[in-house]
Image (cartoon, grey):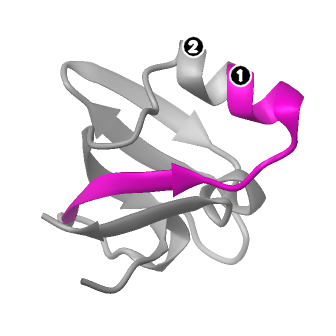
């Protein structure tokens, strides 16, 4: 199963988190928000250009910067 970045998903796509490839501070912040390997994530909305992404993990909606989403590796659920 191949993995790709969260930023490459389209609105409505669901995927499973494979890994987070970020510096320690960002990695810890994302984990505190619920981003963990094996968790399912839904991409709700993508802002145009290089704007943020709105994602849902469980019942929580979170806005991520596009460069942060590019550090989260996922695979299709």
Q: Residue furthest bottom?
A: 2
Instruction: Name above or below for residue 12 compared with residue 38.
Output: below
Name the image quarter holding the C terminus. bottom left
Residue at (56, 23) in percent of width and height? 31
Mark 1: few, some, or many residues within 10 Å (few <14, many ≥20)?
some
Locate residue 17, reporting x and y percent.
36, 51
Mark 1 and mark 2: span between their CA atoms?
6 Å
What is the residue that sits farthest to the top in this orientation?
32
Which segment is the magenta one?
14-28
User: Do the residues bearing badges 1 and 2 touch, measured as CB atoms within 8 Å?
Assistant: yes
- Residue at 87%, 43% in the rendered image: 23
Labelled disc at residue 32:
2
To which residue does mark 1 refer? 28
Q: Decide which of 5, 64 is in the foreground and name it.
A: 5
Q: Position of residue 73 (x, y in %)?
A: 50, 64
> Does the magenta-highlighted stretch encompass residue 52?
no
Locate residue 50, reporting x and y percent.
Answer: 73, 71
Quarter where residue 16 is shown: bottom left
């Amino acid at each position: 199963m191949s993995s790709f970045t969260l930023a490459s998903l389209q609105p409505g796509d669901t995927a499973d988190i494979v890994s987070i490839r970020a510096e320690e501070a960002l990695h810890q912040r994302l984990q505190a928000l619920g981003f963990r390997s094996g968790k399912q994530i839904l991409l709700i909305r993508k802002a145009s250009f290089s704007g943020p992404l709105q994602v849902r993990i469980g019942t929580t909606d979170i806005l991520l910067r596009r460069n942060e989403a590019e550090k989260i590796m996922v695979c299709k659920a």
